[in-house]
Image (cartoon, helix red, strand yellow):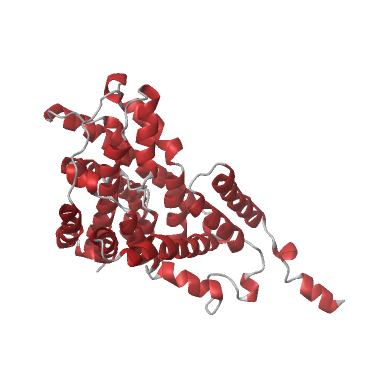
Amino acid sequence: MSELLQFFQTTGFWNVTWGNGLMIVAGLFFVWLGIYRQYEPLLLVPIGFGIVVGNIPGVDLMGSGVNDEGSVLYYLYYGVKSGIYPPLIFLGIGAMTDFSTLIANPKLILLGAAAQLGIFATLLGSLLLGFKILEAASIGIIGGADGPTSIFLASKLAPDLVGTIAIAAYSYMALVPIIQPPIMRLLTTRKERLIKMKTPRLVSKRERIFFPLVGFIVTTFIAPGGIALLAMLFLGNLLKESGVTDRLAISARTTLVDIVTILIGLTIGARTSASEFLTASSLMIFFLGALAFSIATAAGVLFAKLMNLVSRDKVNPLIGNAGVSAVPNSARVSQMLGQQYDKSNYLLMHAMAPNVAGVIGSAVAAGVLLGILGN
């Protein structure tokens, strides 16, 4: 009987807490959102399952948890903690990305830059709420709506907050279709939503090849701290556009990015144990993340309106939301909302320009913060 009791004391039934139960429900909710609502299923399904994994009671007593040195999950999480996984994701993103619309209309890069205001505004807000400067910078990067960049910066500046920041960043990326439209409607008039933009010019192959080379040199001269992300992003794009490395480009944007996405989702989910996640600071991070994302969306829309005051070729402000780097979800939101007011207005190709600019902008912002605060 004593041995039976000893065994029972190692089970989850004996060690479960209300926090474990709450987090398991949250994980199952993420899985439900991914499968039945199809909100970023490639992210939310592994993250949700990881949250369930990280909150099975008694695992830490067995030395099998993500925080237990020597366990399998510990070594899988090392890629997050050390910042290895995010650059690999960026390699895949680069191999998927078509920069043609940005090359054709380079002024739209300003919308991607404007959206980064959410990062720095939230950094200040985090400081006012009592977070330390390194933590505040890591929280602010959520405003870029870029999960890999958020993980990368937090792993360098605030490793203890990586799990919470990553969950917040990916959650808001998945909820783009819910969060952004009300802000876009609030800040635009019906007349502005009906603006039709000129069809972008055709971009030559030579321009597409030169862009990642020139873009890498310029951005890393500005923000050397972001070289790991920027190098992989532009290398992936060069592999795609060169026309002579198709096998490498296909591997980067399919097999590699899929494997790394699974590992990131599972391990950051597993890192959100109830004892570490259900805290006041975690709730504040989620609040600040939502604030960052909202400010970034509003900044992009308002800057598009400002551009229209000085530009002959009008920009539909609905594409300003795409300045956040949730590719391609935020560009799809621009298209969806635009077609609600005019079925013949196709904004997707225009919105992809600030969208990919936002990817570059968030990596540059992370590099700047890492350069200032990382030493």
Report how many numbered discs are placed on residues in the image. 0
Image location (x, y in percent) of residue 156? 34, 66
326 left or right of 276 in image: left
Identify the residue at image location x=42%, y=47%. Answer: 173
Image location (x, y in percent) of residue 8? 78, 70
Residue that sits furthest to the right in the current view: 1
Task: Please state, as top left, top right, bottom left or bottom right, where the C terminus lies in the image.
Answer: bottom left
263 left or right of 338 in image: right
Image location (x, y in percent) of residue 38? 53, 44
Above or below: residue 117 compared with residue 224: above
Q: In the depicted view, which residue is nearer to us: 15 or 359?
A: 359
Identify the residue at image location x=50%, y=44%. Answer: 39
Residue that sits furthest to the top in the current view: 191
Above or below: residue 226 compared with residue 180: below
Residue 127 appears in the rendering: yes
Image location (x, y in percent) of residue 124? 29, 48
Residue that sits furthest to the front in the current view: 244
Q: Quadrant of residue 211?
A: bottom left
Identify the residue at image location x=42%, y=51%. Answer: 169
Q: Quadrant of residue 190?
A: top left
Above or below: residue 366 compared with residue 312: below
60 left or right of 105 in image: right
Q: In the depicted view, which residue is nearer to us: 110 or 276?
A: 110
Residue 161 appears in the rendering: no
Task: Please state, as top left, top right, bottom left or bottom right, where the N terminus lies in the image.
Answer: bottom right
Q: In the depicted view, which residue is nearer to us: 129 or 267?
A: 267
2 left or right of 256 in image: right
Q: In the depicted view, which residue is nearer to us: 208 or 32?
A: 208
